Image (cartoon, rainbow, N blue to C red):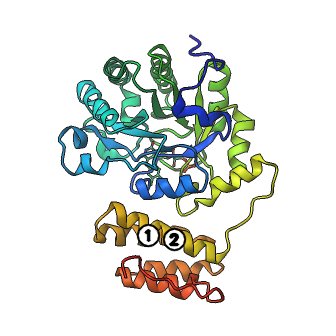
Amino acid sequence: MTGKSPQEPLPEAFSWLQEAPFFQAGLQGYSDAAMRIISRRHGSPYCVTEAMPDQFLNNGGKGLKDAELDPEDHPIAGQLMGSNPANMAKAAGILLELGYDVIDLNMACPVKRLRKNIRGGHLLNRPEEAIAILREVRQAVGSSAPLTIKLRRGFDDEQGSEKDFLRILETAIEEDYFGVTVHGRTVLQKYEGPSRWSFLRKLTRSYPQYRIMGSGDIFTPESIFEMIAETGVAAVSVARGAIGNPWIFHQAHLLLQGKEPRAPAVEEQGSVLREHFELCGRFHPENRTRNLMRKFGIKFSRHHPEPETAEKAFIDCRTIEDWWRVLEDLYENTQAGHKAVPPSS
Ligand SMILES: Cc1cc2nc3c(=O)[nH]c(=O)nc-3n(C[C@H](O)[C@H](O)[C@H](O)COP(=O)(O)O)c2cc1C
């Protein structure tokens, strides 16, 4: 069981693997079109959507509308979450019609409420069901797009967990899935404790011909290359480390060129926040933009020269006007005469 030879030409959606082996992860509640475009403009060559429940797509309506793509947002993996193979296969077809380049199946999400319908990471505990999904989605998609999966290293630390994980992984290889992203924590571990990179290393040694991508504890541009050096993964998924920190991608490119990464000046932070706001307003109604940009502002604040002041200012925002006032008071480049003006005014 060796999977594809890395010598074979890469599908177009993965041509970036040769140049910049890192990408923006799927992040529920964050990795919408606005965050993805900001990440791309800073050098992320590929992005994953947040996990989309299959029924949201199959039932049409808002879920389907939210899945529409911007022309700037490629190459992209649409990530699906569900438990019924036929429904997952149908949703995969919808994503392809919408123009997604890759279909990614989420078998990693640890949220407890998914346990009832055996979705996300709970499938790691039910390998037969996971395998049925992998096969049916492959059947439906055929060779029209690359398929990938997102896994955690197991459901828990019980003995059978790794065996179940390997059965799912080996089915993905047999069914010609392009690759797998493995988060080195168990489902039960959620986000407690470190991601076990030694597990990633074991996988890349056991399946040297397969594309294992790594996830977990990537908070600096340096850690991307540390993970590659330590584990031999083909690419690194940047998750929490990219929220409110699109610069991590540019800094990773600088490291690739042998240059020193630099921290963003406060004016640059302000202009990226403004850009993020404008994108958010393009994709979401006003109340959602307000909530999202408050949340993102809090995450961006850690780069501000006075992080606590900036964080508190964003936390205290109740209206869009409050948000723009924070930008004006704390981020405006007064020397250059920039004014933080809402895009619509
Ligand atoms: C708020 C949040 C939402 C997430 N949502 C998703 C998701 O929708 N799809 C997915 O594959 N992973 C999701 N993840 C997992 C991340 O992609 C990543 O695997 C995990 O955070 C470990 O990487 P890190 O330690 O570098 O953050 C989420 C993580 C967080 C913190």
Residue 287's x, y, as percent?
29, 71
The quadrant of the rendering that contains the C terminus is bottom left
Q: In this view, does 1 lie above or below 213?
A: above
Residue 56's x, y, as percent?
23, 43
Distance from Cα at disc 1 to Cα at disc 2 = 6 Å
Q: Seen in the image, is 44 located left or right of residue 28?
A: right
The quadrant of the rendering that contains the N terminus is top right
Visible residue check, residue 304: no
Q: Which amino acid does label 1 sit on?
A: Phe
Which label is found at residue 273? 2
Q: Seen in the image, is 178 located left or right of residue 197?
A: left
Q: Residue at x 42, y 68 (%)?
A: 278
Residue 338's x, y, as percent?
57, 84
Place residue 341 in its image quadrant.
Answer: bottom left
Q: What element carries label 1?
A: helix
Instruction: Give the labeled residue for mark 1.
Output: 277
The 10 Å Cα crowd at callout 1, few under 14, some 14 to 19, many 20 or more, is many
Q: What element carries label 2?
A: helix
* Residue nearer the viewer, 286 or 112: 286
Which label is found at residue 220? none
Residue 206's x, y, as percent?
64, 19
Q: What residue type is labelled 2?
A: Leu
Mark 1–mark 2 CB contact (< 8 Å):
yes
How many labels, in total?
2
Q: Residue at x 31, y 67 (%)?
A: 288
Visible residue check, residue 250: yes
Q: Residue at x 56, y 75 (%)?
A: 270
The 10 Å Cα crowd at callout 2, few under 14, some 14 to 19, many 20 or more, is many
